[in-house]
Image (spheres, grey):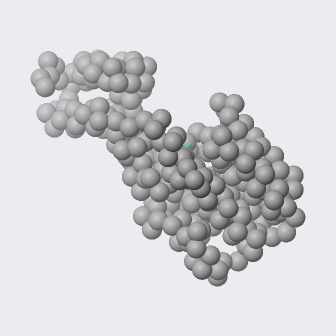
């Protein structure tokens, strides 16, 4: 690879061109904007003001390396090391799912419902901590617990809590094994975005997800797609107060099955909500 120029503006145009076949032009522009800001602290406006700005040899190498990783489908969030979730800047790495915009909608729903109650909430399968932390930020009176099976994920969630000055409890549990959570208290709210992508859906997923994001956070067997929801209802049998609320993010194809499951467990006020794409993505219900 040869660089015709060491001018930032020209390098950017060259890299946008290289990325466009994979990401399309608009997204490539955006990716390159994010990279230049991340690597050199330069915003698009400043580049326009200083078209002559040049990069050093080592800066060009850094830039080139990052573009190479993007061409290998590496998520931009793994290159910069962070993402934005609602108004929080959160660290992410390959141990946690990169928070999705749909999950922001889930948090907005929970905040809307619970903002006037000083609740005890547990987030099961917290990953980066996105749900637990965003909820705590918007509902400071709440006592928030973030649980995960992965020690690596809890490390990231802990770092995010510290950086944001948000006080939450972090605990390691395996929700499929009741012994691991028997000592926990009772909560008013249980929330979870558990793994829900079936092996058949996996075939439709992009390389950036399949190669870089943790399978344990994403996939379930075709034969047992609701395994985590069943386990969370078992958890809630003892650890959710009567009258307590449950909030789930769900596989868009499993809405009716999950409503049925909640009915079988005698939950009340069951409601399915659509996400921004019009897909059945969230469920809420009240324990009798
Ligand atoms: N919505 C995520 C995706 O499609 C999956 C999240 C999950 O399994 N909980 O990548």
Rendering quadrant holding ligand 1: top right
**In this picture, is 179 found above or below 242?**
below
Q: Quadrant of the C terminus?
A: bottom right
Residue that appears at 16% across and 19% down: 5
Residue 215 on image: x %, y %? 44, 53
Please tell me which residue lies in front, 136 or 249. 249
Q: Is residue 89 left or right of residue 186?
A: left
Total marks shown come to 0
- Residue at point 35% right, 24% down? 22
Query: Is residue 182 left or right of 8 when viewed as pictured?
Result: right
Q: Residue at x 12, y 23 (%)?
A: 2
Residue pictured at 43% horizontal, 42% vertical: 209
Side (left or right) of 153 relative to 2: right
Visible residue check, residue 162: no
Q: Is residue 27 visible?
A: yes
- The correct choice, above or below, for 285 with respect to 172 in the image is above
Q: Nearer the viewer, residue 285 or 41?
A: 285
Where 221 sits versus 146, above or below?
above
Q: Position of residue 3 (x, y in %)?
A: 14, 22
Judge from the rendering whether residue 281 lies leftward or rightward of residue 68; answer left or right.
right
The image quadrant that residue 66 belongs to is top left
**Place of residue 136 in the rendered image (x, y in percent of width and height, measured from the top left):** 66, 58
């Amino acid at each position: 690879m040869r660089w015709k120029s060491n001018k930032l503006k020209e390098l950017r145009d060259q890299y946008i061109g290289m990325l466009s076949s994979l990401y399309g032009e608009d997204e490539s522009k955006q990716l390159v904007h994010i990279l230049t800001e991340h690597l050199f602290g330069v915003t698009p406006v400043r580049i326009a003001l200083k078209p002559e700005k040049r990069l050093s040899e080592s800066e060009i190498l850094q830039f080139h390396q990052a573009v190479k990783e993007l061409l290998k489908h590496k998520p931009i969030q793994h290159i910069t090391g962070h993402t934005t979730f609602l108004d929080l800047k959160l660290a992410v790495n390959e141990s946690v799912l990169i928070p999705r915009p749909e999950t922001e909608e889930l948090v907005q729903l929970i905040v809307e419902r619970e903002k006037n109650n000083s609740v005890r909430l547990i987030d099961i399968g917290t990953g980066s901590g996105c749900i637990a932390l965003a909820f705590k930020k918007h509902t400071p009176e709440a006592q928030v617990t973030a649980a995960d099976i992965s020690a690596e994920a809890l490390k990231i969630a802990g770092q995010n809590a510290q950086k944001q000055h948000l006080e939450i409890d972090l605990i390691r549990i395996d929700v499929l094994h009741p012994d691991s959570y028997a000592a926990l208290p009772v909560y008013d709210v249980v929330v979870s975005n558990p793994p829900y992508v079936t092996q058949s859906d996996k075939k439709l997923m992009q390389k950036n997800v399949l190669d870089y994001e943790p399978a344990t956070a994403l996939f379930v067997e075709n034969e047992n797609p609701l395994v985590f929801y069943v386990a969370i209802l078992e958890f809630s049998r003892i650890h959710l107060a009567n009258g307590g609320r449950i909030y789930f993010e769900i596989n868009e194809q499993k809405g009716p099955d999950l409503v049925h499951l909640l009915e079988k467990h005698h939950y009340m006020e069951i409601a399915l909500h659509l996400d921004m794409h019009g897909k059945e993505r969230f469920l809420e219900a009240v324990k009798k």
